[in-house]
Amino acid sequence: MSALRLILADQLSHSISSLQALEKSNDTVLFCEVMEEATYVPHHPKKIAFLFSAMRHFAAELEAQGIQVRYIKLDAPQNTGSFTSEVARAINALNPSRVIVTEPGEYRVLETFKGWQALLGIPVEIRQDTRFLANREEFAAWAKGKKQLRMEFFYREMRKKYSILIEADQKPTGGEWNYDKENRKPPKSGMTSPARISHKKSAITKEVLALVKNCFSHHFGKLEPFHYAVTRDQAIEELEHFITHLLPNFGDYQDAMVAGEAYLYHSLISSYLNAGLLLPLEICQLAETAYRAHRAPLNAVEGFIRQILGWREYIRGIYWHLMPEYGTRNTLEATRPLPDFYWTAETHMFCIAETIRHTREHAYSHHIQRLMITGNFALLAGLDVKQVQNWYLAVYSDAYEWVEMPNTLGMALFGDDGVVASKPYAASGKYIHRMSNYCGKCQYDPNEMTGEKACPFNALYWDFLVRHEDKFRGNQRMPYVFSTWDKFAPEKQTAIRAQALKIIERMTNGHL
Ligand code: FAD
Ligand code: DLZ
Ligand code: SF4
């Protein structure tokens, strides 16, 4: 029985289920670089280059093990441009008796895979993706009967299940489940990002860079300089560098933002983890080992592990639990077109311009930039939830719908009926001023509410809350917000709302 085994660009793990029980003499592993995937949103050129180079390196590793590989490059003359047509072509050429795949990360792709058996007339086995720490059935069982699906409680179950930061008496290490109150410090004056590893470009990477330059230069984002890891060995090097040199400060400065510094103490591993070059459990175990060896404090280690064992698994659980209906939600009926400055960085708001510059340069910005700068603005200005999601899906090298959608629609835009966030992550300029050094470089003033110089986030913040008063006034987690608004004199309230209108006008006319 010969099998055709398809591996996608985000399935580059030697332990992936679709490679299990492979027969070297009978089976062929198929990789295909296809236009359909590269353009369903206009992906950042660095993301495409990273994925194509990592796929080619991974395919070469399999070949070196004596495994038969069929690798279809994007510019191969016969390349038909989609997963379906390339699998059909491979079946014609190789005549396998079945196709084996691991479930994909996106709902639309899974639906395509499910149609293959009937379409292609050959058995198609779709295997579970065992790289995740909670499978879909397990998440559904946890969610069943719960009124609210809060990450914190899911995370505690995962800590116990994998015995991560759990003591012999089954209590959490240090006595608490969560050390966030010790985290989230503003940046220290003069703080810079510690040096990062940069990888030498292999011949494979050079060839991919030329291809991407040729085909995708019109997409948003700079292709070079290109420093990404493209093999598991290189990704492990980055992970170890992070654990040794950056993890000790990760917790303290997790939410800090500094002009000119894209990375600070963040791990930069999401692209490698999501593509399969790293696995979640090994990362959590390495971080725990650093804590046990007194190489990193508990607040940093717990905070980091929570992102992976908690948030990442929970976000995936929500996506599969609620799709496809989840993708149609738009609780706050946000429909304003995305302004051009999300693509050009041409705005006087320094915080937004800076975040978009980082994104353009690196296909990366850190969580608080995504959530509290570009996400917060989109929330307050009522930007169209689909356009905002497509932007996030295109511009970040770690973006796939399973992780992008609940983060954008749910966490940033409060567009999912409050499943992911119990209250909106809405903030005025005051928060950005406290957590960054951006405002000192901005033509707007975070302390002004109205007038030409007033920070746009301020009036937009109040206008947003009042616009959606019916949803938020009774929210237990926002006790003082509306009592503050109620204390404003009526003239002040009117001036704030008029200012918000002007800001939207300036945004629409490209003058913000
Ligand atoms: P670190 O800050 O070092 O965190 C460590 C790891 O924890 C990350 O590598 C990631 O794997 C995991 N993690 C942290 N937060 C989350 C989260 N909320 N959801 C899932 N995993 C998390 N992450 C993606 O991987 N892909 C996306 O497309 C994506 N889109 C986002 C969109 C918005 C609007 C927001 C607010 C967040 C998004 N995130 C996304 C989550 C988070 O911002 C990134 O995982 C993180 O910035 C990646 O950088 P890092 O590796 O340096 O992370
Ligand atoms: C994101 C992406 C891109 C840009 N190109 C390809 C590709 O050419 N071939 C491939 O196998 N996968 C690609 N991907 C990743 C897929 O979009 C991803 O596997 C699905 O979205 C499922 O998560
Ligand atoms: Fe951003 Fe407002 Fe600060 Fe300017 S003043 S950087 S717009 S928060």
Image (cartoon, helix red, strand yellow):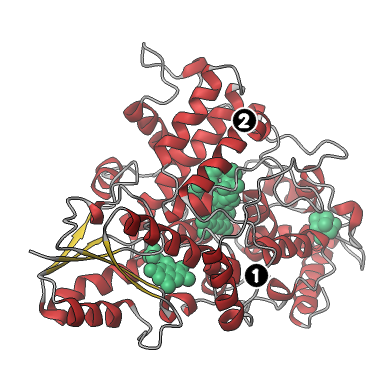
Task: Give the residue pinned by disc 2.
Answer: 244
Q: Say left or right for 247 vs 97.
A: right
The location of residue 155, given as percent across then percent down, is 42, 35
The tag on residue 432 is none
Say which amino acid is labelled 2: Thr
Report the quarter where the N terminus lies.
bottom left
Mark 2: give few (<14), some (14-19) or many (20+) Cα within 10 Å.
some
Residue at horizontal 43%, vertical 38%?
Answer: 309
Residue at horizontal 64%, vertical 32%?
Answer: 251
Q: Is residue 73 above or below residue 500?
A: below
Report the quarter where the C terminus lies.
bottom right
The location of residue 380, given as percent across then percent down, is 67, 63
Residue at horizontal 49%, vertical 23%?
Answer: 289
Q: Does the residue labelled 1 lie within 8 Å of ligand 2?
A: no
| Residue 209 in sight from this viewpoint | yes
Q: Say left or right for 215 vs 313.
A: right
Task: Give the residue pinned by disc 1.
Answer: 223
State the residue in front, 326 or 451: 326
Dot 2: element = helix
Q: In which quarter of the image is residue 46?
A: bottom right
| Earlier-in-chain disc, 1 versus 2 | 1
Q: Is mark 2 within 8 Å of ligand 1?
A: no
Q: In this view, does 287 lie above or below 370?
A: above
Marks 1 and 2, how far apart in space?
Answer: 29 Å
Q: In which quarter of the image is residue 483?
A: top right
Q: Say left or right for 154 vs 246.
A: left
Residue sitting farthest toward the top: 169
The location of residue 104, given as percent across then percent down, is 32, 62
The location of residue 430, given as percent across then percent down, is 80, 48
